Amino acid sequence: MSVGRSLSIAALASLWLAGASLAQPFREPAKGNAERAAILDAIRPAVEAEMRGPVEFVVTTMRASPNWAFMQVESQLPGGGAIDLAQTGLRDEAEMMDGRTVFAQDHDDLGRSDPNHKRDRFF
């Protein structure tokens, strides 16, 4: 086997092992689960600020690991009513939006058990 081929195989193996060591298993927290509620509560203030009032979420997708969560949720008024985007902070973008879908990622290096820790959130 040539030296170049050996180095290529070693490099690919190193990349594969590095990726495998960084990979974190994810799960989907069940409806009614305290972790699921904590994840949704982490994004609720930012969404309520944009919607200018209280919201409920209908979860389409949620994936969580020990220090991050990704979710796709549909925002609605408490009780299930539709949010009128013309009455929100998103009124200028309402024509370009596809409903009231929110995609969010919540990252917390310390875990969700510390309510005073600043989390990184992306919407």
Image: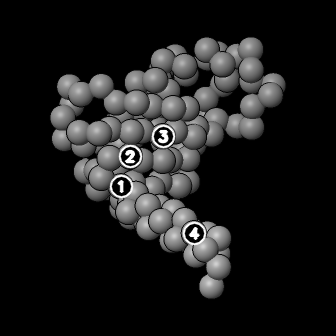
Question: Mark 1: which secondary structure?
Answer: loop
Q: CA distance from mark 2 to mark 4?
A: 35 Å
Nearer to us in this view, 18 or 100: 18
- Point out residue 90 in the picture as x, y percentages from the top left corner: 66, 19
Q: Secondary structure at mark 2?
A: strand
Between the C-alphas of marks 1 and 4, the distance is 34 Å
Give the image location of residue 74, x and y in percent. Answer: 57, 42
Marks 3 & 2, CB-CB < 8 Å contact = yes
Q: Amino acid at mark 2?
A: Trp
Q: Secondary structure at mark 4?
A: helix
Q: CA distance from mark 3 to mark 2?
A: 7 Å
- Give the quadrant of residue 17: bottom left
- Report the front residue among 20 and 108: 20
The Cα–Cα distance between marks 1 and 2, rounded to whole angstroms, is: 5 Å
| Earlier residue among tags 1 and 3 | 1
Residue for badge 3 = 105
In percent of the image, x 29 and y 39: which residue is there? 109
Identity, as a three-letter code, of the amino acid under mark 4: Leu
Nearer to us: label 3 or label 4: 4
Cα separation between marks 1 and 3: 12 Å
**Residue under numbered circle 1:** 65
